[in-house]
Each structure stands twice: as structure tokens, then as C-alpha cells.
Image: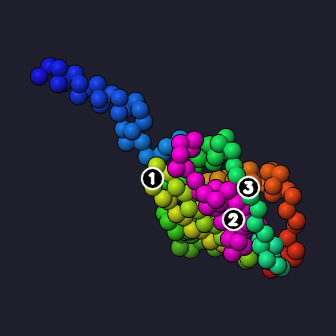
Amino acid sequence: MKKGVIIAISLALVVAFSGMGGCDNPAAGESGFNLIFKYGIMAKNELDTFKGTYTKDMVQGPSIRTDLSLSRQEMDRIYQKMVEIDFFNYPDRFSVSVPPGELISLVTPHPGYYFKVEYASRVKELWWEDDVTNQNEKADRLRELIKLIRDIVESREEYQKLPPPRGGYM
């Protein structure tokens, strides 16, 4: 009986300290953390870490796709920012709510965002049409994540070799 209790406690400790004890968010370096991130007007730019590709919206012409794989360190930075802003608990369709009676500030054209994140054998998807510019903490935090991902992508040589888009959206 005493030996069985010791074994049970030992197993519980092993599970707890191995990271299997209810951890919803794995380290980004663990296999299984990948994402598709679409952004921009009509969300036409796309980073796909599943395939190791980046697709750039050329506005007046076909999009251009190139090979672009993020390093483990870059993936870790993205994952840590997701944890920091509580990304995995955002609704699947995010929007900024404005209290009744408060003026709504809209922007057109506006960027759209789509995330498909695979982590810990789970999939989290999030859509957001960023057309409301009223102050909102959750929107600001999501924009921090978006800026981080864009900064990482745009700092890469593969991205910098791509031509600039022709034209613009109005």
C-alpha cells in the first residue's frame, strides 16, 4: 500500500515537471507550432510556416510567392508574444466593440487579418477586420503581435529581394 502511494506521487511529480500537467501553451520550439498569418488589405499577404513560404500582394498584378522559413528563435518570439497577449483566448472572430453613444472612428480601406495557429495538437483560428480605430486594449495588443510578425518577415533577406507592390488601395 505504502509503495503504491509513493509510486503514484512519483508519477504525478514526473507529469507535473515534464510539462504535461495541464500546460495549454507549449514552447514554440516544440514540434507542432506553426502558423498561417494573412494580413493587409483583403488579407492578401501571407506567411505560411507550415510550407515555409511568403506570398506578397502586388496590388496591380499577381501575388508573388517565395520560400521563407522562420528560425526557431523567430518562432519563439512570435509564440512568446502570443502567450503574453493571451492570443489563444481571443474569440475566433475578433472585433472592436464601441459603447453606445460613443463616436465610432472607421478607416477605409482597412487591413484584414487571419491567423491559423497550430500548437499542442490544437488549432486556433482568428479573423479580424481592423476597421474600427477607437481605443481598445485587446486590439492594441493584437496589433503588437501583428507588428512583431511583420517586422520579422520584413527584416528577412527573402522578403527584401521581392519587388515593391505596384499601385495602392483607395
**Residue at 74% across / 50% down in the picture?**
152
Q: Is residue 169 above or below residue 64?
A: below
The span shown in magenta is 28-56
**Marks 3 and 2, Cα distance to the nearest angstrom?**
11 Å
Residue at the outermost top position: 2
Q: Nearer the viewer, residue 108 or 134?
A: 108
Q: Quadrant of the N terminus?
A: top left
Please name whichever residue, 74 or 134, is drawn nearer the observer in this view of the structure: 74
The reply to whether residue 168 is visible in this rendering is yes
Q: Earlier in the sequence, mark 3 or mark 2?
A: 2
From the image, tell me which residue sits under label 3: 68
Residue 162, image quadrant: bottom right
Which residue was labeled with disc 2?
46
Label 2 neighbour load within 10 Å: few <14, some 14-19, many 20+: many
The front one of 35 and 131 is 35
Secondary structure at numbered mark 1: loop
The x and y percentages for residue 160 are 85, 56
Q: Is residue 2 left or right of residue 72?
A: left
Q: Secondary structure at mark 2?
A: strand
7 shown above or below 111: above
Disc on res. 121 = 1
- Inspect the magenta stretch and tell me whether residue 44 lies in it: yes
At a point 78% along the width and 69% down the height, the residue shown is 64
Confirm whether the magenta stretch covers residue 66.
Answer: no
Please name the amino acid that badge 1 sits on: Ser
- Disc 3 marks which amino acid? Leu
Tell whether 51 sits left or right of 64. Answer: left
Cα separation, mark 2 vs mark 1, equals: 22 Å
